[in-house]
Amino acid sequence: MDGVDLDVARGEFLSFLGPSGCGKTTLLRIIAGFESADSGKVILAGQDISHLPPERRHLNMVFQRYALFPHLSVAENVAFGLRLEKRNRADVNRRVAELLELVQLSHCAKRNTNQISGGQAQRVALARALAKNPEVLLLDEPLTALDRAVRRNLQVQLKMIQREIGTTFIYVTHDQEEAMAMSSRIALMRDGRIEQLAEPNELYRKPQSTFAASFVGDANILSCKVENLKGTPELTWRGSVLSGPDLGAIRDSGELRVMVRPEDVRLGPAGSSQVPGVRGMVVRSTFHGFYWMHEIVVEGESLLAREISETPGVVVDEQVDIVIDARHAALLPD
Amino acid sequence: MALARSAVDRILVALVLIYLIIPVAIVVIFAFQQASRTGLPFEGPSLRWFELILKDENFRGALTSTILVAATSAITSAFIAFCAALATSRGKLPFSGVVRNLGLLPLIVPPVFIGFALLLTFGEIGLTPSLFTVYLAHVLVTTPLAWAVMQARFNGFDFSVEEAARDLGAGRLNVLRRVTLPLTWRSVVGATLMSFAFSVDEFVVTNFVVGSEGTLPVLVFSRMRRSIDPSINAIATMLLMIVLAAAIIAWLLLRSGPDHEVLENAPDIELPIGSPAVAGAESKEKSVA
C-alpha cells in the first residue's frame, strides 16, 4: 500500500479494480479493520475509526467464500448481528424477514447453509451484512466463486438492491466487466497504488496510463509522433494523420503513445479508402456473437479491430487498409 | 487359486485377531472366576471379586485418584491443545509450524525417560510426589494427543467465519462462544476423552512420580507383586471398561466430525433475473412459505 488517498461519497458504488496482488483486498480489509495500516487514517462519516476493532466499526463485509456460519440456519445467519445487539426477538424476526424478502430468499429461511446454492449463499451473506444498516457495505470479490450465469444475475440484483437501500458499496473485483457494469466510480489499482479513479466511461475512454488502457477493455497502444509541419502540431501514426485528440500543450515533435479502442479501427479492402491509410494483413478473426474481432499485423505491430456485424467484412490473409477514427483516441502520458 | 488365497488370508486375519483378543479375554473372563486362582478350569461365573474390590479401601482410593487425575489432566490438556491449535492455525504467529510440531514431541520421547526426567525435575524444584505431580505428568503425556486431535480439526478450518462474526459486532469472547466453539466442540470433547482414556491406564510415567496415593494401574502393579488373584482381573476389567467407554464416545464424536464445516453448496440453477420461469417459481415458493 502506498499513498492511497480516497474519498467515497455517501450512496456511491465504488469499485476497487485491479489484478491479483494489487492491494485491493488489503485496502478493503484495512477499511474493515482486519488489517492495520502502517500509517494513515480511515475516516467514516467524519469520525476517525482507524483504531477501532472491526466489531466496533459501523460497516459490514461480504466475503468472497460467503463465510456463512455453518452451524446456524439461513435466518439465524442473518439474525447474528442483530442478536448481538440484544434487540427483542420480535424486532429481530421482523428485520430478518424484511432482509430475506430483499434478497428473495424468504422460502429458504429455515434451511441449513449447506442446503442452498452458492448464489443463494452469497445472497444470505449480503442480507446478513446489511442487517445492521451499515454506513458502508464492503464486498470482497463476492461473485468470484460463482458460475458465469449466476454472476451476471447477481450483478443485476446487487445493483438493484444498492439503489433501493442507498447504502454506500465498496466493491473489490478483478473483473473489469463487472466493475464497469456496476460501479458509479472505479478505482483502478496497481502495485498498492490507485492508478486512476474515474467513472466507468471515463476510465474506458480516457485512460491515463498504458496500464489503465490495457486493463480496462481491449486496447491498441500506438506509438505515434507529433509533427509540426504546417504550424500546428499534428499526431501521426505510420505517416497517417490522426485527427481528433486534443494535443493540449504538446508542441514539439516527439514520440507519444496513443490508445485507440478496437471499435475505432476501420478496415477496408486494400486500396478502397479515400484517405491514405495504413496497410496491414488480417491474421486472425474471431466471432463473439454480435461482433467480429480482427487481428491485423502491420510490419510486425499487432492491432485489434472490432467489427459489429454478423458477417465479417474482411477475411484472414487479406491485405486491408486501416483507417483510425481518432476522435476517441486517448493520449497516454507514460 | 483365488479361493485358496482368500482362505489363507482369512485364516491369517483370524489368527491375528485371536492373538490380539485372547489376552484381553483371559483377563476379563477370569475376573468372573469363583475360585481364587486365575487359571483353568473356569468356575463361576461370580461377582465376588468385584464385590471384594469395591469394599476395598485401597481400591476405592485408587479409583477416585485415577478419575480425579484423569479428568483434571484431560481438561487441562484439551484446553492447552485448543488454545495452541487455534493460535497456530490462524496463521498470524511466527514459527507456528515449529510450535505445531513441538507440541507433538512428547509422543516420541520414551515414557521411561519422561518419568525419570520428571522425577528429577520435581525433586529439584521441591515438589514432593503426590497426586498433583501425577496430574502434572499426565498433562505432559496427554497434551500431544489432544494437540493432534485439535490440530486436525483446525487444519482447514475456515477462519473467515470468525472474521464475519467480528464484522457483525462480536467481540473476541462472543466469537469464541457463538462461532468457534460451536464448530469445534466435538473435537474438544473428543480430545478430552482421549486424554482421559490415556491418563486412566498410564503406568510408566506415573510410577516415577506417584506419591502415597496411587492410581489404579499402580495398584494393579503393586498387588501383582504380592500375589495374583482374580481381584486384579476385576480391577483390570473395570479399567478396561472406563477406557473403552471414553474411547468409544471420543471415536463417535470425531467420526461424525466437522459435519457443519465443509460448505458444499448445491449448483445454482437460477435463470437470469426477470425471466418468467424464475419469477413464477419465486412467487410460488413464497406463497407456499
Image (cartoon, grey):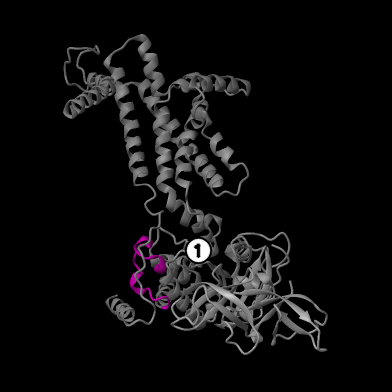
Q: How many marks?
A: 1
Q: Residue B3: x percent and y percent?
A: 16, 28
| Residue at which label 1 appears | A64
- In reply to whether residue A112 is colored magenta, the answer given is yes
Whether residue A166 sits left or right of residue A251 in the image: it is: left
Q: Residue B54: x percent and y percent?
A: 30, 24
Picture residue at 56% right of the left edge, 21% below the top: B117
| Above/below status of A24 relative to A168 | above
Task: State the residue in front, A329 or B166.
Answer: A329
Picture residue at 52% right of the left edge, 29% below the top: B106
- In reply to whether residue B239 is colored magenta, the answer given is no
Q: Residue B63: x percent and y percent?
A: 37, 27
Picture residue at 40% right of the left edge, 69% below the top: A120
Whether residue A248 sits left or right of residue B122 in the image: it is: right
Find the magenta span and give its range: A102-120
Please report, as a chain letter, where disc 1 is located.
A
Which quadrant would residue A301 be assigned to in this image?
bottom right
Quadrant (top left, top right, bottom left, bottom right) of the N terminus of chain A: bottom right
Q: Residue B277: x percent and y percent?
A: 31, 79
Task: State the residue in front, A234 or A4.
Answer: A234
Element at label 1: loop
Q: Residues within 10 Å of mark 1 (few under 14, many from 20)?
A: some
Whether residue A15 sits left or right of residue B19 in the image: it is: right
Q: Is residue A134 visible?
A: no
Q: Amino acid at mark 1?
A: Gln
Please identify the residue farthest to the front as the structure is shown.
Answer: A271
Q: Is residue A139 visible?
A: yes
Which quadrant would residue A57 be assigned to in this image?
bottom right
| Above/below status of A142 relative to B148 | below
